[in-house]
Structure formats: C-alpha cells, structure tokens
Image: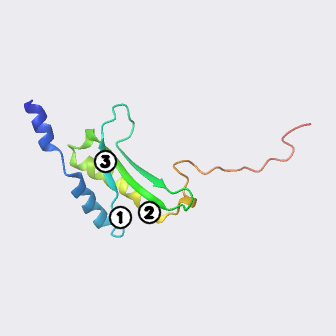
C-alpha cells in the first residue's frame, strides 16, 4: 500500500508540461486532448490520433495517447509529448487530402519494356 502511494505521488502533471512545450515550440497550435492509457502489450509510448470529416476533409479532433508506464519519468514524458505535439501540429497544418494516413504513399513504377515475354 505504501509503495502505491509513492508511485501515485510521483506522477507528473502532464497537462502543464504539454502546455509549456506547445507554447514554447508551437505558439499557434491548438493543444489537443491528452489521454493516459494502460495497454500492456503495446509497442508505443505515445500516439497521436486525429479524426477527420470525410466529406469536408477538416480536422475534427486530435488526441494524444500516453502510456501510463512513463508517467513517473519527466524526461521521457517531455520527449514523448514533444514528439506527439509535432504530429498534432502536422495534422493541424496539413490538409487531410495531402496526408498519407500513417501509410507510405503508393508509388507506381513504370513497366519495363520487354519485361514480359509472350
């Protein structure tokens, strides 16, 4: 019980850190919502999710997801938040029609002449 109290007391105020980082590096950024998640088998520490309106292409909502496991280390939390704020800023500046939705753009390669023998 005493260990649990120490861990809870050590957790940082992520909202204040996110506001400080956003005002320092991205003064025109609308600060996205931040959600703390506890997903055991995930391979990521932070994630930026953006929902778009399919008809108009405008951004509806951006949320930054942060793993609960990094909430006690200030340097890791700042690093992850700064990285995810870059993605939030990119989504705010770039229209949806120009984004790749997290995938590589598909490249169409020219067909080599004489490749297929008939």
Q: Do the CB atoms of the residues marked 3 and 1 lie less than 8 Å apart?
A: no
Dot 1 or dot 2: first in sequence order is 1
Looking at the image, which residue is at 25% across and 62% down? 20
- Provide the secondary structure element on which disc 2 rests: helix
Q: Using a 10 Å C-alpha cutoff, classify the residue at mark 3 as few (fewer than 14 neighbours), some (14 to 19) or many (20 or more).
A: some
Looking at the image, which residue is at 23% across and 44% down? 71
| Quadrant occupied by the N terminus | top left
Residue furthest out toward the front: 55
- Provide the secondary structure element on which disc 3 rests: strand
Q: Do the CB atoms of the residues marked 1 and 2 lie less than 8 Å apart?
A: yes
Looking at the image, which residue is at 76% across and 51% down? 110
Closer to the camera, 104 or 51?
Answer: 51
Dot 3 or dot 1: first in sequence order is 1
Number of the label disc, if any, that sits on residue 101: none
Q: Please indicate whether residue 24 sits to the left or right of residue 91 in the image.
A: left
Looking at the image, which residue is at 54% across and 57% down? 99
Q: Using a 10 Å C-alpha cutoff, classify the residue at mark 2 as few (fewer than 14 neighbours), some (14 to 19) or many (20 or more).
A: some
- Provide the secondary structure element on which disc 1 rests: loop
């Amino acid at each position: 019980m005493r260990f649990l109290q120490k861990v809870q007391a050590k957790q940082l105020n992520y909202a204040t850190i996110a506001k400080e980082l956003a005002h320092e590096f991205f003064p025109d950024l609308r600060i996205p919502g931040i959600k703390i998640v506890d997903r055991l088998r995930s391979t990521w520490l932070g994630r930026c999710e953006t929902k778009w309106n399919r008809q108009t292409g405008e951004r509806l909502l951006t949320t930054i997801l942060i793993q609960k496991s990094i909430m006690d280390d200030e340097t890791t939390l700042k690093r992850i938040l700064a990285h995810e704020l870059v993605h939030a800023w990119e989504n705010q500046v770039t229209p949806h029609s120009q984004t790749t939705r997290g995938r590589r753009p598909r490249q169409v390669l020219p067909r080599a002449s004489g490749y297929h023998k008939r």
